[in-house]
Amino acid sequence: MKDFLTKHTNIFLSLLGGIAIWVFWAFIHPEALSYHEQFQMFLFDTDYLLARLALPGGMADYIAEFVVQFFFIISLGAVFLTLLFLLLQQITWRLARKWGATDMYYPLSFIPVVYMMGTMCNPDVMISLIVALTAVLAIALLHATIKSPKLRLASIILILPLSFWLFGYVTAALPVLFAFNEWRSKQPTKSIATTFGVSLAVSILIIAALYLFAGLIHRGINAILIGFNFFRFDDQTPSTQHICVAVITLFPALLSFIPAIRKAEKWGAISLTALVLVVGAFHLTKQFDKSMWRMIKYDYLVRTLHWDSIISMAEKTPSPTPYDAACVNLALGMKGQLGERMFEFPQFGTEGLIMPFSSNHFATLAQSEIFYQLAMVNEAQRFFFEAQAAIPNHYESTRVYRRLAETNLINSHYGVAQRYLLRLKRTLFYRSWAESRLKMIENKELFNKENEYYNLRKLSGKTDILYSTNLLNQTLARLYYQNKSNSLAHEYALAYAVLDKNIKFFNEILNHDAAHWKKYVMPRHWQEAYLLATIAKEDRDLPVTNEAMEDFRSFFNAYSNNPNDPMLSIGRLKTSAWSYILGTK
């Protein structure tokens, strides 16, 4: 058994590495896969393929989008991504091995994987980057297997233009790799110089051709040469991406330079494995922007309707931004806990309940989901449309198309909904969903059996409600007045008034349902706001609990003597509506 393990050490290392990569994407950061999947729509048709191949780097895009569509099922998507990383590792090692690297340094072949994962900690680095880098190394390996020096030289004339068109600017590393291969394969110096010279001449011709091509596709030459396939914002490509390209493409050559240490081969491999693990974990930890990824995780949980998970996450780590607060408040509202627990979490005014419009494609999605759950269907549709238009690389979004189909179904705009559904029908994971909704259009009775759409149609009210940032308090109240079954609109109307510190309007909404509150106990924060609104009254129309009255007396006894009394910053007084409204937090 020991001999078997020794003989197959590299296989076991790759297996363990693959498991670690899969766990990272499937369990530690599944939201990263969802983020990528929701901003594309891979279609199984020839036109879609030709549209990708019409631009430099299009094959990398096409392969990457094929892989990313599987991210819809996180565990399955993580398998595909793991296989892609292992392919990069294996090709890196085979190329380094061909150039003279020894088995002792096999663990170091995972360094490009770790480095690439660190680069992908920026969520807007596209999966096409790892596809293109893997392809470049595979092309270099394939070229190195050609035994005839003349044939290798001749093949460059075909390989460079074709590889550039298929995989983009990262193929700029190929001339260096070709020349290095000639050197390591012990060819005469003339062969090395000739190889690099031919590669350089072909590259210059490619650049010249691109200057002409740039005008045809209305893209700047800089965008084409730098690569608009590998970063979601093609005009903001970070320098770290270029460093990543250089490190990964040149790493096999660097690995082949490390001299062998025969006497320490066994323990050296073990030490290097431990080193890669430690450095890799440290690198990934440092690369992650916790605030940004927290927002992406909240978006993922909102998309998947995991309201309890959002609340649990907020309990462990306070929300530092209005975006986070908006997601947490939505989760509280969906669970009927907004009036009871809202001030247990950081609040940022009304922007932390319903964010103002933003042209950011990501932030707009969360805003759209809030409107959708509130049954403000027209506003949800408008914001989803804006989110689609704001996607930086102009890709179509499956998530947005699905919601646009739904909002049009709810509004009885069946013809428009059908166009979105027919588009989704050409995808892999949305096909059956789209087909079931198309049947609803054909048979309207099925629509009435679909609880979500049927209920949202009823909750949306009898007339269209125009959204205005300045009149959002009245909009929410009116939405509730039109349909008293819309409990989320009721919660949001009350919460908005409290967060706006408009206690008078809060009291008007509350008294609109006076009969209801005389039968049922008001949530804690509504009682607190009501006591503040009626502070001058001895006899109140609506009942409040003894606990709320005791807290009320404790808070205002302390506040009247010293607004900065430390007592106001502990326990229930700290998480009260009074603390927020009077600014004692």
Image: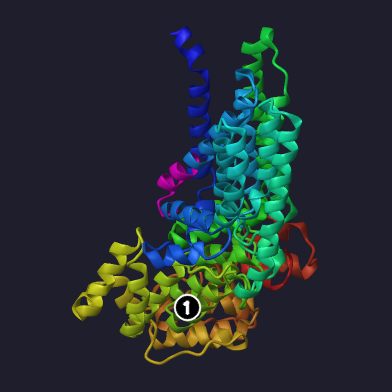
Per the image, label 1 sits on a secondary structure element best described as helix
Tell me which colouring the rendered structure shows.
rainbow
For the residue pair 196 and 579, the one nearer the viewer reads as: 196
Residue 105 lies in what quarter of the image?
top right
Along the horizontal axis of the image, is 461 left or right of 99? left
For the residue pair 293 and 279, the one nearer the viewer reads as: 279
Q: Amino acid at mark 1?
A: Ala
Along the horizontal axis of the image, is 329 left or right of 336? right
The percent position of residue 262, horizontal first and vertical second, equals: 67, 10
Is 79 included in the stretch rendered in magenta? yes
Q: Quadrant of the C terminus?
A: bottom right
Relative height, residue 259 to residue 228 (above, below): above
- Which residue shows up at 53% across the image and 54% down it? 60
For the residue pair 233 and 371, the one nearer the viewer reads as: 233
The percent position of residue 529, horizontal first and vertical second, equals: 59, 75
The percent position of residue 311, horizontal first and vertical second, equals: 52, 56
Q: Quadrant of the N terminus?
A: top left
Residue 351 lies in what quarter of the image?
bottom right
Is any part of residue 283 visible from this angle?
no
Count of number-bearing discs: 1
For the residue pair 164 and 397, the one nearer the viewer reads as: 164
| Mark 1 neighbour class, 10 Å CA radius: few under 14, some 14 to 19, many 20 or more | many
- Which residue shows up at 64% across the image and 12% down it? 265
Write down the residue under mark 1.
380
- Which residue shows up at 50% across the image and 49% down it? 30
Magenta span? 71-82
Relative height, residue 311 to residue 91 (above, below): below
Give the prevailing secondary structure in the magenta stretch.
helix
Is 18 included in the stretch rendered in magenta? no
Along the horizontal axis of the image, is 107 left or right of 192? left
The percent position of residue 263, horizontal first and vertical second, equals: 68, 7
